[in-house]
Amino acid sequence: MTEQVAGSDGGAPRGTPSEVFFAFLKLGLTSFGGPIAHLGYFREELVVRRRWLDDHAYADLVALCQFLPGPASSQVGFALGLMRAGWLGALSAFLAFTFPSALILTVFALAAPALGGVWGDGALHGLKIVAVAIVAQAVWGMARNLCPDRERATIAMAAVVLMAFAPGSVGMLAAIGLGAVAGLVLGGGQTGPVAGHLAVPASKWTATGAMVIFVVLLVCLPLLAGQSQTFAVLDGFYRAGALVFGGGHVVLPLLDAEVVQSGWVTPNAFLAGYGAAQAVPGPLFTFAAYLGAVLGPEPHGILGAALALLALFLPGFLVLVGVLPFWDQFRSKSVARSLMRGANAAVVGILGAALYAPVFTGAIFDLRDFALASAGFVALVVWKAPPWVVVLLSGVGGVGLALLD
């Protein structure tokens, strides 16, 4: 495995699809806690440990994916796989990161096992607690690298304040946009050399083709939806994936509108699947696999799960491919670098706001919960423990806390 940081020689070190697959399979099996926590897992595994790219390039990529529709953490993973090992690397990253949770949720949909009782509820609570430690580690590490001066620290703090009064995807996009403008004003376009060259093996023609496909599917699938139920399912999930900004939990109202209000999935089944999705690692968008499997009309079962999963992820990936080839050229300009410095600082603030709500408020209910989260943070930051070990121990700790009640 190449240990050189991306961009240190003006290019990007190349890996293999198998290297990408196993790196993301590990993440797909251990990345609990939702999209914000996933970005922390990605940073620890691919930036800090494997050194595929540096913090600046990683933050630039995160900021880009936050601007685009679709699942931000999966888009970051897809882009990292593409830059590391080409198109097969991108496919490997997507399959390895997505398949474990999609398989678990499909099996759950087909077999309807119930998560409950002291052991099940305790383990689930422990997995929520470990997300606090993971996100805190990400905020700590990125703040040191991306907010080293008063100006950028102030931008990060302003992003926290903005998120407090305008939570959700609208506030997030506003924070990044205002942070970029503040970076330009305070930086004046005078920054150092570009760090972490984002070498993307995709031409501008490929990017244009991806955007054309994105628009054609968005326009044509509704016209075909009346022809068959299969097209109707593809249209519903594709539209949800194309219109969601911020990813993660933001997609739930859109999915509810498509499958519950249409009568394809009962409200109880929808909520049961959403609860199960919180207990599995990997992207929350794999909730689509569960919904596709439990659809009332055909296609359902395994075929429905596969179609729903593909349709929900596809638009975000098409838009990402359409933008990436132009991204490195844009960020090489001095004005753009000042914009990105401010945007990166705002991303740190957004992560800090997310650390409090929903991550901290959704997991920490008493001092014992806080103690377990603190122990996880110390294990990650001070003892450099592997994230999967901390996840496992937190799950066990959650069960222990439940048994004490």
Image: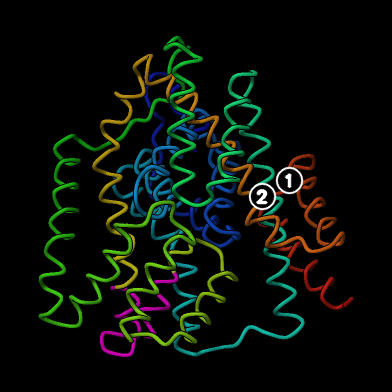
The percent coordinates of residue 220 (x first, y second) are 11, 64
Please tell me which residue is depicted at 44% across the width and 37% down the height of the picture. Answer: 63
Residue located beneath label 1 in the image: 380
Specify which label sits upstream in the sequence, 1 or 2. 2
- Magenta span has 329? no
The answer to whether the residues at label 1 and label 2 have Cβ atoms under 8 Å apart is yes
State the residue in front, 18 or 58.
Answer: 58
Q: Secondary structure at mark 1?
A: helix
To which quarter of the image does residue 121 belong?
bottom right
Amino acid on which disc 1 is placed: Leu
Figure check: 226 above or below 114: above
Residue located beneath label 2 in the image: 134
Please state if 357 lies on the left or on the right of 210 as rendered. right
State the residue in front, 345 or 23.
Answer: 345
Please state if 384 lies on the left or on the right of 96 as rendered. right
What segment carries the magenta color? 287-307
Amino acid on which disc 2 is placed: Ile
